[in-house]
């Protein structure tokens, strides 16, 4: 028999970010509990800032009865040991003489079968709900009043109803009931007499229970504002999700601020709105305008005071920002104060980091023919905005503010852009690319030199991100960054550490960039190649080969090549044409020698692949491991020569399909 089941956990306002982070797990955790208790049923989960709701249209009133089988020891063991029989009988709750034996496989075992009556769902639900609530992980928890249990926010009510019957239990110092609460503007609690009433009564009392419906309402009414005022509202999906999570009856409202604040960089205004106030920025004719959209949670027809209150709050924030902006412009960019900011224990100050980056930048400028003067100036000024009042207040704007202050001082646009892009994974020009690489190289080498190496999923200093950015920027900007070469060149400037560990760490990040068979990447790295551009080129070449329809046959041939010479020292290759005894040797060697005239990697790979028929004939007709040592070495040298040329691109024996 099935009945509708409604569970609502009423709480003080939930913080949006922890709720949204746990959201993907909430339904899964309830489903696991249903399966564990043999009460699996379809359900929906809804949330508002004040309630977590589980709704089953059909829920089993009891577990299904089931037959439980108990198997004991083999019959021959029980016959030798009477105590084993007594133990099994006791376990099953029967007399020893009632034990039967049943064949499983080729043996007879002690066996007992019993019917287990399913438990009533009402009896199990209190435990299940408690288990579910304790399984939810929102990060920080709190205690309240005399309650010893902890939750993300105080639990204020629990509604649990099976059709029209209240399931009574206690959890988090609250007794379950058939009572729920309306929107905060309403004072009277809501009594639910039948679960179907719940949805209708909430809707009439200012609560839009369905999160998707709240989201749709916000977007629908923002669209209306856009048409009415001829504006464009920038919809940030993360911000939208956050607002959906903190409202029960959302209403988008258009507010304004003084035009004088538009002299501020747009990022300052947008950050003040989005990060601090949860407002959507507004554009007109493609430019930021002096308006914003706030989503109210009030249930009213008069929003004038709400709009005025939000305008007042934003005005105060923007006034502070304007004060910081004007002061910073007067003071200009300087790095002397960075000497007083500790970068990290054992790594000196931020000023010291700047100087290390300058050293790297000088080397990079020489290697890659960049404007050294511009690059060094960009590195020198890159962190100067850390000393500004604006970045002290809006830390997320570091780099961005440096760009605006540099522009205000008339500094070259390439340098200013490099300052802005230094914390990102993009570079608009060569100066920006090399500044970014210098910053990330120093971060990696400095942190590795003091043992701050990521372990497992933990990476508190963002070193994986630093390596990712470096690889992406080098490849996208055509910078042939040789990882082994540059790290070994920079090594003397840092404390002694295992640079091979850092090199492997950086190359490990390559697997993130290519959605391909990982063995392709492994085969290229196995050659010892460490130039990022060459690695990228070779990975793409080998991947095309692996994806070709003929690769299975190619793989068989060339892996045989690799296996024949796996213990052969490639430094001892020596081919003497006078030792050839068969045409298959001569034909293969004469064709292979043409490789010396090929410089292009793609052409070389195509040429080596074209040798397959000749190699197959060689293996079919020529015995490599003959008794004559000179002939054996000569034949292995011929095959090793082919393998060595292939090794210039990839180690074919590493490729698996």
Image (tube, grey):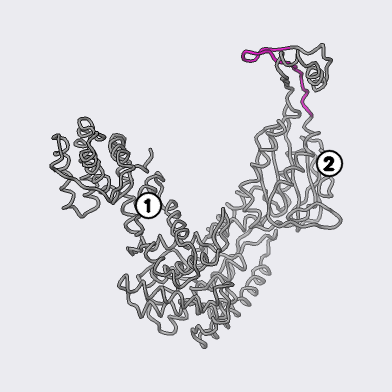
Q: Quadrant of residue 537 in the image? A: bottom left
Foreground residue, 54 or 481?
Answer: 481
Q: Is residue 199 visible?
A: yes
**Magenta stretch: helix, strand or loop mostly:** strand
Q: Position of residue 146 (x, y in %)?
A: 86, 56
2 or 1: tag closer to the N-terminus: 2
Residue 101 sits in quarter:
top right
Q: Residue sitting at 53 percent across and 72 percent down?
A: 397
Q: Position of residue 622 (x, y in %)?
A: 21, 32
Identify whether 406 is placed above or below 472.
Answer: below
Task: Indicate yes or no whether the magenta region holds residue 344.
Answer: no
- Residue 525: assigned label: 1
Residue 463 horizontal side relative to residue 548, left or right: right
Compared with residue 555, is residue 485 higher up or lower down, i.e. above or below? below
Gap in Å between the C-alphas at discs 2 and 1?
62 Å
* Residue plotted at (14% across, 34% down): 582
Q: What number is the disc on residue 169?
A: 2
Q: Name the mark on residue 348.
A: none
Front: mark 2 or 1 = 1
Pointer 2 and pointer 1: residues touching (CB < 8 Å)? no
Q: What range is drawn magenta here?
A: 101-119
Q: Which of 480 and 180 is in front in this view?
A: 480
> Quadrant of the image for the C terminus?
top left
């Amino acid at each position: 028999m099935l009945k509708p089941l409604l569970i609502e956990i009423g709480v003080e306002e939930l913080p949006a970010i922890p709720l949204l982070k746990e959201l993907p797990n909430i339904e899964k955790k309830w489903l696991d509990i249903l399966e564990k208790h043999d009460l699996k049923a379809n359900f929906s989960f809804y949330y508002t800032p004040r309630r977590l709701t589980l709704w089953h249209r059909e829920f089993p009133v009891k577990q299904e009865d089931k037959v439980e089988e108990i198997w004991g020891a083999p019959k021959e063991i029980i016959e030798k040991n009477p105590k084993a029989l007594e133990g099994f009988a006791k376990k099953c709750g029967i007399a020893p003489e009632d034990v039967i034996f049943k064949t499983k496989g080729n043996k007879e075992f002690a066996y007992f079968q019993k019917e287990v009556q399913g438990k009533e769902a009402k009896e199990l639900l209190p435990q299940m709900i408690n288990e579910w609530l304790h399984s939810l992980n929102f990060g920080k928890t709190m205690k309240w009043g005399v309650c010893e249990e902890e939750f993300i926010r105080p639990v204020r009510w629990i509604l649990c109803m099976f059709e029209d019957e209240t399931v009574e239990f206690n959890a988090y110092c609250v007794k379950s009931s058939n009572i729920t609460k309306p929107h905060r503007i309403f004072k009277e609690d809501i009594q639910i007499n039948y679960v179907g009433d719940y949805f209708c009564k909430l809707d009439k009392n200012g609560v839009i229970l369905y999160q998707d419906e709240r989201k749709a309402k916000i977007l629908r009414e923002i669209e209306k504002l856009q048409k009415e005022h001829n504006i464009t509202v920038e919809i940030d999906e993360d911000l939208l999700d956050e607002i959906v999570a903190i409202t029960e009856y959302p209403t988008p409202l258009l507010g304004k601020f003084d035009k004088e604040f538009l002299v501020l960089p747009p990022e300052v205004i947008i950050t003040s709105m989005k990060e601090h106030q949860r407002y959507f920025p507004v554009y007109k004719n493609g430019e930021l305008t002096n308006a914003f959209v706030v989503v109210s949670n009030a249930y009213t027809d008069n929003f004038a005071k709400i709009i005025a209150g939000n305008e007042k709050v934003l005005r105060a924030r923007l006034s502070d920002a304007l004060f910081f902006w004007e002061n910073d412009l007067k003071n200009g960019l300087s790095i002397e104060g960075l000497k007083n900011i500790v970068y990290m224990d054992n790594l000196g100050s931020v000023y010291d980091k700047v100087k290390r980056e300058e050293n790297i930048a000088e080397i990079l400028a020489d290697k890659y023919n960049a404007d050294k003067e511009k690059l060094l100036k960009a590195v020198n000024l890159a962190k100067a905005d850390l000393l500004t009042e604006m970045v002290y207040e809006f830390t997320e704007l570091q780099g961005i503010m440096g760009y605006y202050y540099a522009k205000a001082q008339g500094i070259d646009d390439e340098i200013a852009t490099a300052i802005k892009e230094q914390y990102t994974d993009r570079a608009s020009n060569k100066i920006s690319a090399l500044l970014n690489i210098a910053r990330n190289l120093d971060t990696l080498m400095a942190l590795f030199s003091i043992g701050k190496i990521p372990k497992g999923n933990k990476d508190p200093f963002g070193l994986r991100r630093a390596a990712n950015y470096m690889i992406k920027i080098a490849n996208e900007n055509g910078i042939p960054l040789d990882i082994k070469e540059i790290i070994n060149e920079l090594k003397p400037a840092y404390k002694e550490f295992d640079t091979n560990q850092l090199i492997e760490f950086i190359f490990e990040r390559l697997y993130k960039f290519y959605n391909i068979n990982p063995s392709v990447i492994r085969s290229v790295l196995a050659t010892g190649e460490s130039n990022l551009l060459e690695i990228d080129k070779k990975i793409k070449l080998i991947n095309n080969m692996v994806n070709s329809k003929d690769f299975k046959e190619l793989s068989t041939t060339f892996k045989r090549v690799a296996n024949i010479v796996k213990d052969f020292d490639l430094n001892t290759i020596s081919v003497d044409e006078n030792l050839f005894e068969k045409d298959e040797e001569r034909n293969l060697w004469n064709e292979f020698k043409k490789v010396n005239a090929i410089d292009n990697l793609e052409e070389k790979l195509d040429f080596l692949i074209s040798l397959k028929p000749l190699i197959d004939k060689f293996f079919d007709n020529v015995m490599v491991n003959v008794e004559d040592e000179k002939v054996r070495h000569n034949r292995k040298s011929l095959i090793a020569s082919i393998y060595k040329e292939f090794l210039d691109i990839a180690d074919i024996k590493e490729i698996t399909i």
